[in-house]
Image: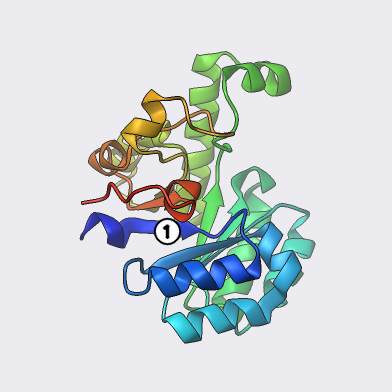
Amino acid sequence: MKLTDRIIVALDNMNEEEVWAFLNKSQHTYQTVKIGLELFYLLGPDFVKKIHHEYNVDIFLDLKLHDIPNTVKKAIRSLKGLPLKFLTVHLTGGRNMLTEALAEASTCLPATNLLGVSFLTSLGKPDFKEIYNFNETQTKLTFSNLFRLALQTNIHGVVLSPLELGIVKNEEQQSGKKLIKVTPGIRFAHEINSNNIQDQQRIATPEDAVKNGADYLVMGRSITSGTPNFLK
């Protein structure tokens, strides 16, 4: 698979006009785009359908659903019929929420891969200490627990920072199962070297993430802001 085929382009920090301009310019370059909370709240389901049908791209709808099981179930039901390749829920919603989400998606969104979000890439060591009182070892152990939950519930994949890919590899080997691994926090080497990483803390280059086992890479401003294309 070419590196560009692994890229999920995040259409974040863009208005509708900018989205169309980017899609027109990048047609046939990227196979998948990500629509997050901001664009989905602003433009709704019809926007998702229009992008999919007019540009023949797969859709990653990044809603990060996280609520009581029945609410998440009904939220997924409300998306019925949308052409989604990926949809996100938070693993920290727990086993019952994930089970309900999977059951509803199998009926309403049968072609959609449900991805469990672990820890946001914007969280760094001080955040884990402040929020959870975790040191680095405890953070890794908790991530392992979340990934095991993903394996046990048979969710289709996980969203994780590139720094957790090594943990995932060990867990998959022990379980004999493999999940789709989607990594945000991807920056070109020149951006990392110049500390141009915006609000993300746990990051890696596209090449390193793929080398360490990522199946898909989420990249936004590095591509959509007009930065020269460093992808081979």
User: Which percent across, then down, holds residue 194?
Assistant: 42, 25
What residue is drawn where x is 78% and y is 64%?
A: 70
What residue is drawn where x is 63% and y is 22%?
A: 128
Q: Nearer the viewer, residue 106 or 210?
A: 210
| Residue 28 placement: quadrant | bottom left
Figure check: 170 above or below 9: above
User: Which percent across, then down, holds residue 223?
Assistant: 42, 52
Q: Is residue 79 visible?
A: no
What residue is drawn where x is 40% and y is 28%?
A: 192
Q: Secondary structure at mark 1?
A: strand
User: Which percent across, then down, holds residue 5?
Assistant: 29, 62
Compared across the picture, whether 126 is left or right of 30 comes to right
Figure check: 223 above or below 120: below
Q: How many marks?
A: 1
What residue is drawn where x is 48% and y is 66%?
A: 22
Residue carrying label 1: 8
Kind of residue at disc 1: Ile
Q: Nearer the viewer, residue 139 or 224?
A: 224
| Residue 99 placement: quadrant | bottom right
| Residue 81 placement: quadrant | bottom right
